């Protein structure tokens, strides 16, 4: 790792990893901007939310919150519930983000699903500083989101595109990462725990509230199966 | 809502989101050594998280037994899997899988 490598070399190294996000955020961000625009919000409110919140599914939910009655406590609790999965990202990145200086604050602030996925799994090239690579990924992904949602917010319903279904690129990205993880023996048990817990909790609790029970189930299974998982990891 | 109320709501959502991202780093400060259990979680949570994320993306079509709901997703994921296992190139698998889904959505279902 080279601490003195330039930020532009980190950008060049990170950019290819963010291409699927560019496609997904390009369309999802524009869709969000259009939704905000037809809901009566000026484009700069959309930009402001994409800059300060930067959490895709939460921002879609927030459109309805902003159209309803003023209920800040309800909005706060709903935010915690929808975004609770971020806590697992933080735990996974505790060591990776260690010692990254002032950059770390932005790395944590900008850790959406997609940025976490890249920074958690990408192999940073030897000649690129790890912290700068993480920063480049985070900045690129948030730029895509802010720009796309602002464009959607400005042009509103004027835009029409036959790109229906392109948002599937995000699902495919998480799926392919999962497949790669399952192919490694040491990650297999954990991956199956995540899939199984998610599927069972979704079937039992329904799409609106299944994330919290899923997280609890994952922690429980990981803890119970820890001896087995440690053994697999050592082989 | 008035303008001020809109800004307060946005602020509350921004703070709530940031809190879920910062919480682990606040509780497990980096100036103290990470405990063995947290190291274990840090190392073995990610595969489970990706399993959870895949289910999260499919939450509105999985276990919905109505007409052809979920069929396009299932076929496209299967196609992505075949591409990924044969070509082993992530970007190629994503492109192929997404193209497959878009074609199914726009011309079949």
Image: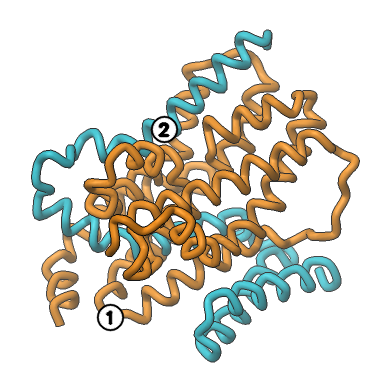
Q: Is residue A87 above or below residue A183?
A: above
Circle 2 residue: B18
Measured as percent of width and height from the top left, residue A121 is found at: 38, 65
Badge 1: chain ID: A
Residue at screen point 18% across, 75% down: A233
Pick the front one: A182 or A17: A17
Q: Which residue is mark 1?
A: A185
Residue A157 x/y as whole percent: 87, 39
| Shown colour of chain B | cyan
Counting from the top left corner in percent of width and height, residue A180 is at: 41, 76
Left/right placement of residue B109 relative to residue A226 reads right
Tell me the CA gap for discs 1 and 2.
Answer: 34 Å
For the C terminus of chain A, give its image quadrant.
Answer: bottom left
* The hue in which chain A appears in the rendered picture of the protein: orange
| Element carrying mark 2 | helix
Q: At 56% from the left edge and 37% from the top edge, which residue is drawn?
A: A58
Residue A113 drawn above or below residue A224 = above
Q: Secondary structure at mark 1?
A: helix
Q: Report which quarter residue B18 is drawn in.
A: top left
Q: How many marks?
A: 2
Q: Quadrant of residue B64?
A: bottom right
């Amino acid at each position: 790792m080279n601490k003195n490598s330039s930020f532009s070399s980190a950008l060049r190294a990170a950019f290819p990893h963010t291409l699927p996000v560019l496609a997904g955020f390009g369309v999802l961000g524009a869709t969000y901007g259009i939704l905000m625009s037809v809901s009566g919000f000026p484009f700069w409110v959309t930009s402001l939310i994409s800059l300060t919140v930067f959490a895709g599914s939460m921002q879609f939910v927030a459109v309805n919150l902003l159209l309803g009655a003023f209920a800040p406590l309800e909005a706060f609790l709903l935010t915690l519930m929808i975004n609770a999965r971020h806590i697992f990202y933080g735990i996974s990145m505790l060591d990776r983000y260690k010692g990254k200086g002032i950059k770390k604050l932005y790395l944590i602030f900008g850790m959406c699903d997609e940025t976490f996925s890249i920074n958690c799994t990408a192999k940073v090239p030897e000649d690129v500083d790890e912290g700068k690579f993480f920063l480049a990924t985070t900045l690129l992904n948030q730029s895509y989101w802010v720009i796309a949602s602002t464009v959607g917010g400005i042009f509103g319903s004027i835009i029409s595109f036959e790109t229906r279904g392109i948002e599937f690129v995000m699902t495919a990205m998480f799926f392919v990462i999962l497949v790669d993880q399952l192919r490694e023996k040491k990650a297999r048990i954990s991956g199956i725990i995540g899939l199984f817990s998610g599927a069972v909790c979704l079937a039992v609790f329904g799409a609106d509230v299944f994330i919290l029970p899923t997280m609890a189930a994952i922690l429980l299974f990981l803890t119970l199966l820890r001896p087995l998982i440690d053994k697999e990891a050592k082989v | 809502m008035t303008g001020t109320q809109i800004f307060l709501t946005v602020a509350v959502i921004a703070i709530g989101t940031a809190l879920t991202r910062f919480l682990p780093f606040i509780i497990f400060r980096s100036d103290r050594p990470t405990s063995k259990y947290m190291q274990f979680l840090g190392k073995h949570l990610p595969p489970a998280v990706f399993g959870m994320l895949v289910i999260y993306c499919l939450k509105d079509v999985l276990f919905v037994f109505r007409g052809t709901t979920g069929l396009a997703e299932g076929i496209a994921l299967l196609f992505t899997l075949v591409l990924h296992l044969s070509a082993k190139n992530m970007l190629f698998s994503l492109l192929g899988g997404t193209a497959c889904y878009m074609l199914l959505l726009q011309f079949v279902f």
